[in-house]
Amino acid sequence: MGIVSKLRRTAAATGLAAAVAMVSTAALAAGEAKHPEARDWHFTGIFGTVDVASAQRGLQVYLEVCAGCHSLKHVAYRNLGALGFTEAEIKAIAANFDVTDGPDSQGEMFERPAVPSDRFVSPFANEEAAKAGNNGANPPDLTLQVKAHPGGADYIHALLTGYADAPEGVEVPAGSNYNPYFRGGFIAMPAPLAADGVEYSDGTAATVDQMATDVVNFMQWAAEPEMEQRKKTGFKVVIFLIILSALLYAGKRKMWANIDH
C-alpha cells in the first residue's frame, strides 16, 4: 500500500512537519485575521457525507507531514476501517509506531509495535517534551481542531494555504512567518505544505491546495466519525415527526368534526 511504504520517511520530515500550523507560540502582533473564503465541502449540509477518497489521502498527509509534531490521540487505528481500509492495511499502518506497554511479569514497562486497538501514537512522550522540541510551543492535538476554530474547515484550509510574503512596509519578526488568516498576521510555524510534499498512491497531483483539502477532510472525519449516521438518524426522526404530526392533525379533525363549536 502506498501509505505504508512511505511511513518510514516520517521522521525525516519532522522539521517540515513542525506543524499543520494550527497555533503558534504566540500571536506576535495585534490585529484581526483575514476572514477565510467559504468553500463547498462534501460533508456540509443535511445530506453531506465524508469524501472517503479525499480523507484517505488526508491520512497520508497527516502521517507523512503532520504526525511528527501533532497527535491524534482520540482516534484508534481500527477506526480507519470506516474510511475503507482493510484489516491488513490498518495493522500495517499501526505497526510502524511503537507504544509503551506493561508492566510485564517483571514489573517493567516495555515497547511494542502498535496494534489496531491502540490510539494513534503521539509524537512526544509528554507536554514538556513537545514544548522542548517546538521552541516552547505545545503543538495541539488535531482530533477536534475542525470543530474548535470559528470558521472550522474553511479556516484551517485558508491557514494552510495562506502563507505569503508580507505586504510592503510590514516587517515580519525574526522566527515568524506572515499569514493573514492567523490573528495578528504573524505565525511562528513555517508553512507545513509544499507542492509534491507527498506522493499520493492514487496518482492525484499533490498541490498545496489539494493536500490542504485532503487533510481537512480527514480532520473533519476524525472530529465527527459518527457524522453520517447522525445525519441519517436525524433525517429519519424528522420524517417520523412529520408523519406523526399529520396523523395527529387528521385524528383531531375527525374527532371534532361533528362537535358544534
Image: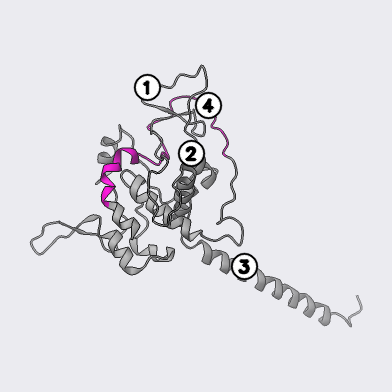
Query: Pointer 3: residues within 10 angstroms few (<14), some, or many (20+)?
Result: some
SS at circle 3: helix
| Label at residue 31 | 4
**Image disc number at residue 67:** none
The quadrant where residue 90 appears: bottom left
- Quadrant of the drawing holding the N terminus: bottom left
Asked whether the beta carbons under mark 1 and mark 3 sit within 8 Å of each other, the answer is no
**Residue plotted at (25% across, 55% down):** 97
Q: Which of marks 1 and 3 is nearer the N terminus?
A: 1
Q: Residue at x 52, y 46 (%)?
A: 152
How far apart in space, not on screen, are marks 1 and 4 (Cα)? 18 Å
Give amino acid for label 2: Thr
Dot placed on the residue nearer the N-terminal end, 2 or 4: 4
Would you say the magenta stretch is mainly helix, strand or loop?
loop
Give coordinates of residue 198: x percent, y percent.
Answer: 37, 47
**Of pointers 4 and 3, the one earlier in the residue sequence:** 4
Looking at numbered disc 4 in the image, what kind of residue is underneath it?
Answer: Gly
Q: Where is residue 132 in the image (x, y as percent from the top left)?
A: 26, 35
Say which element carries label 2. Answer: helix
